[in-house]
């Protein structure tokens, strides 16, 4: 909790808090800033807006921001404890791994993603993802779907990309047909939870005017958030930072493969699953890079409608996460 606080305790409001918290307040109080175009636009994060909006009816927005931050940070600290225990890391090594992750994420991100900071939907979703990863490492797949579904309920894209990566890791494990029947009720439960966040978000993508939808996607990708969504428009230093993180990840992968005989079978299975999650995230980013490189110039209408789903968000988080955890696991051993 102290580490997270030191990394994230900037003054209120943070960059996104100044947008999302007034939007949440407006959702529950239409008399607050009436007629504002952004505040009256579609809201894709239903649970967060409900939590922050209801709180803002009785508290000033500054207090709502700090309460949301403390809730997010406590949830992250709790989730990290469970994650480091799943890898059999001591508390001290777990703290060092957390510091390494936050350091590499802050300086080495490619598309500007972050985990700890101001209060918004993803600061609750990412701790739930960590809970899902801890369950995956322990082989408790039924809880993976529940935690990833809960993350999707808070933030559809954060939970969606992480859940897809975990699902692909699960799919390549042996005896899939038998395990599919066993996992089906839990998968259904995760999907139902995820629909709490996905359905409101999808409603914002629909509309009667196709031209307007295509135009809005291009504005979103190439003008409003190009630093998140279109690698061709990323700053040069972001490419170098991401290349450094990827090089470290490759080095950790080689180290892991060369020393995996030193782990007991259960520990090896969990660590291997985590490593595969990292490489799945890299695969997602490569697909997004291909879409941007092949389509953005000639067919920006198609490219924008694909790129708006943040193909690089999960790799920004997962690559340094897996690198730090497996590196410190090896150092501790």
Image: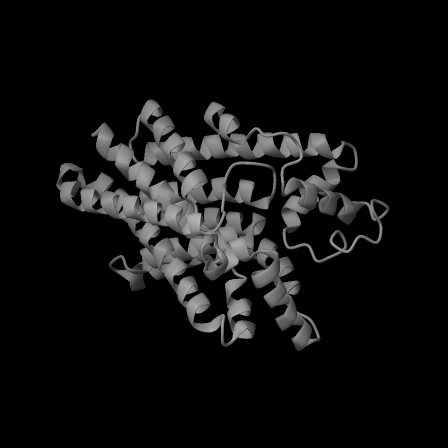
Where is the C terminus found, in terms of image quarters? Answer: top left
- Give above or below for 224 relative to 78: below
Place of residue 244 in the rendered image (x, y in percent of width and height, measured from the top left): 33, 45
248 sits to left or right of 165: left
Q: Quadrant of residue 321?
A: top left
Q: What residue is drawn where x is 27% and y is 43%?
A: 271
Place of residue 267 in the rendered image (x, y in percent of width and height, measured from the top left): 23, 39
Which residue is most to the front?
Answer: 236
Choose between 240 and 317: the one closer to the eye.
Answer: 240
- Give above or below for 249 relative to 300: above
Q: What residue is drawn where x is 47% and y is 46%?
A: 147
Does residue 9 appear in this view? yes
14 sits to left or right of 83: right
Choose between 22 and 295: the one closer to the eye.
Answer: 295
Choose between 170 and 317: the one closer to the eye.
Answer: 317
- Give above or below for 270 relative to 77: below
Does residue 138 appear in this view? no
Place of residue 331 in the rendered image (x, y in percent of width and height, measured from the top left): 23, 30
- How many marks on residues? 0
- Give above or below for 309 relative to 59: below
Q: What residue is drawn where x is 75% and y is 51%?
A: 39
Place of residue 238 in the rendered image (x, y in percent of width and height, measured from the top left): 43, 49
Choose between 120 and 261: the one closer to the eye.
Answer: 120
What colour scheme does the image use? one colour
């Amino acid at each position: 909790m102290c580490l997270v606080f030191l990394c994230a305790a900037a003054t209120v409001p943070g960059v996104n808090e100044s947008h999302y918290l007034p939007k949440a307040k407006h959702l529950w109080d239409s008399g607050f800033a009436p007629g504002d175009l952004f505040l009256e636009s579609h809201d894709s994060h239903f649970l967060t807006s409900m939590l922050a909006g209801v709180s803002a009816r009785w508290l000033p927005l500054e207090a709502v921001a700090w309460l949301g931050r403390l809730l997010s940070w406590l949830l992250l600290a709790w989730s990290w404890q469970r994650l480091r225990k799943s890898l059999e890391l001591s508390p001290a090594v777990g703290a060092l791994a957390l510091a390494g992750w936050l350091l590499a994420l802050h300086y080495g991100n490619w598309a500007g993603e972050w985990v700890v900071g101001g209060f918004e939907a993803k600061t609750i979703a990412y701790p739930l993802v960590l809970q899902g990863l801890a369950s995956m490492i322990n082989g408790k797949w039924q809880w993976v779907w529940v935690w990833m579904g809960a993350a999707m309920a808070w933030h559809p894209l954060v939970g969606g990309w992480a859940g897809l990566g975990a699902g692909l890791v699960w799919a390549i494990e042996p005896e899939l047909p038998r395990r599919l029947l066993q996992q089906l009720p839990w998968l259904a439960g995760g999907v139902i939870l995820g629909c709490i966040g996905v359905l409101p978000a999808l409603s914002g993508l629909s509309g009667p005017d196709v031209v307007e939808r295509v135009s809005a996607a291009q504005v979103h990708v190439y003008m409003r958030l190009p630093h998140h969504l279109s690698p061709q428009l990323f700053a040069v230093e972001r490419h170098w930072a991401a290349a450094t993180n990827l090089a470290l990840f490759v080095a950790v992968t080689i180290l892991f493969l060369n020393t995996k005989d030193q782990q007991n079978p259960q520990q090896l299975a969990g660590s291997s699953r985590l490593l595969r999650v990292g490489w799945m995230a890299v695969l997602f980013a490569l697909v997004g890079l291909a879409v941007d490189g092949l389509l953005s110039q000639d067919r920006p209408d198609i490219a924008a409608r694909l790129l708006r789903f943040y193909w690089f968000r999960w790799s920004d988080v997962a690559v340094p996460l897996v690198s730090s955890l497996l590196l410190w696991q090896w150092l501790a051993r």
